[in-house]
Structure formats: C-alpha cells, structure tokens
Image: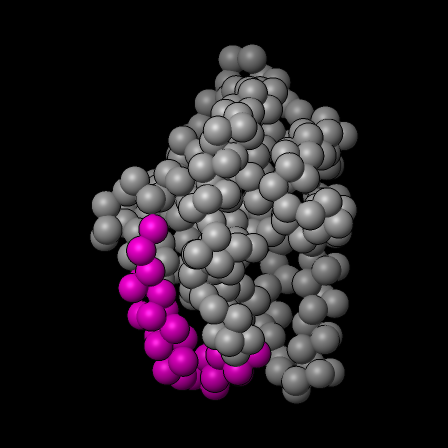
Amino acid sequence: MLPAADIESVVIYAVNRGYIAGLAEMYAEVPEKECADCTKCCSLVPRATFTEYLNAYRYLKAQPKDIQDGVLRRTVEFFFLELADPGRRCPFDSPEGGCLIRPVRPFECRLFGMLSQEDYDEAEQKRLAQIQEIMTAFRNEYGIELPEAVLTPRPYCDRTGAANGSSISMADADMVRMRLLSHDMNLVAPEHVFRKATYLPLPVHLAMTVLNPGIRGKRVEVVQEFLQGSRTLLDKYAARAESFRF
C-alpha cells in the first residue's frame, strides 16, 4: 500500500502507538495446537492487514541481506504469477524449508488447521468462485487463458492431534479479522479499510512497496509472456527488486 519513501515513518508510528504490540494480544486468541511441520500451509499465501504487513516488514528489515533478496525475488514472482503459475508457494517459505517470518506470521497463517472441515470447505468454495471470475475477465478482456489448475482446492489441515483438540469457528475468526482491520483505521484512510483495500496477500503488500506503479502496471504483459514460455520481463523486474533496501 505504501511506497518505500513513506513506510519507515508509518512503521515507527505503529510501533510507538502500540498497534504492533497489540497484534500479539489478538493472535493469542487462536487456540494452540501441535504442528506436524507438513508445510501444507506454505502452499497458501496468507492475506494480511496493513498493520500485520508493517510487523512483517519490520521483522524482515532485521534479517540478513541474502534472506531479504530471496524474499524480494519470490515476492515479485508471486505478484505477477499468482494465477499463472499454480504451483507457486508462499514467498516467505524458505527453499530449504521453514517459514522465514514465523514469529510475525499473520493471523491467516495461524488460523490454518484450526477450522472445521465444513468451515474450511465453505471458504474454499468462495475463493475458487472469485478466481473463476478473474479467469473469465482475463479471457474476455485480454484473450489470456489462465491454467485450470489454479482452481484446484487447497489442502485441508486438521491439527486435532494436539492434546487440547481445540479449534476456532469461522464466526470467531471473522471477529478477530475485524479487530485487526480496526488497527488499520488508525494508519490509513478509513474508506480503504471499509473496502478491505488494506487486506491483501502479504507479498502483494510488499510488492506495492518495492515496485513502482509503472512496473506494477505491467502485470498482464508479464503474465502473457510467461504463459508463452518466456521469463524475460519477470526476471528483469525480479532482479530490479533485489536492489531494494529495507
């Protein structure tokens, strides 16, 4: 949402006003369960509020340059190829395995494996319906056929092997989301929050900071080239992103 020139001051403001610290309180409402480290959740790319993004940005800034460069490249690739390359994993998933931002991962990551099968399936149906609409728009407006594999349901995870066996309902999850979004209203214009314009895939938040509007506007062109078997533009923009300094 914010270009690099503005984000530092907003991060400082969010920290000083306690909005970043307040995330931990809301995350604590998600029941704890054991994780088998199967990395199913890393095949999803979580949505995050703007405040959660600031928290992740702040964490990434403290990481070694090689980690930052890998995240930046994979973030740009995700931004352009989210629906053109169905096998793409979360940019914050290390190629060696493991989440690179685990301590500050957003609510949606923490929620994975905590919903009932019924709630999860309902959410998946809504997500796939939205993707179908996007596929139709790409076909009608640009003559681009996105791969059908993007309509493959994402894997369900049920961490019921934990001793407490607790879970969270979709209604309770929605309440936490609303409270998280309320933090955003202290940082950006409320109308953006009402439209959920601050609730984006986490790598898209980062791409909005790293890439200038002109490059972001090349999305359709990059997708079309990629589906024709070329990565020229994609590699060009990914390499440019690696020069970004947190």
Viewer-proximal residue among 178 and 100: 178
Side of 94 relative to 188 (left or right): left
Q: Position of residue 224 (x, y in %)?
A: 53, 82
Side of 64 relative to 61 (left or right): left
What's the coloring here?
one colour
Whether residue 245 is visible: yes
Residue 221 lies within the magenta run? yes
Residue sitting at x 23%, y 51%: 65
Residue 59 lies within the magenta run? no
Q: Which residues are magenta?
A: 219-246
Choose top left, top right, bottom left or bottom right for residue 181: top right
> Measured along the vertical axis of the image, is residue 21 above or below residue 4?
above
Could you tell me how many numbered marks the image carries?
0
Q: Position of residue 232 (x, y in %)?
A: 37, 82
Residue sitting at x 64%, y 62%: 151
Magenta region, main secondary structure: helix
Side of 195 relative to 207 (left or right): right
> Measured along the vertical axis of the image, is residue 124 above or below residue 137?
above
Q: Residue furthest top?
A: 164
Viewer-proximal residue among 230 and 101: 101
Q: Quadrant of the N terminus?
A: bottom right
Residue sitting at x 54%, y 28%: 17
Residue sitting at x 73%, y 75%: 136
Q: Position of residue 175 (x, y in %)?
A: 73, 29
Q: Position of residue 129 (x, y in %)?
A: 74, 59
Whether residue 181 is visible: no
Side of 79 relative to 200 (left or right): left
Viewer-proximal residue among 155 and 130: 130
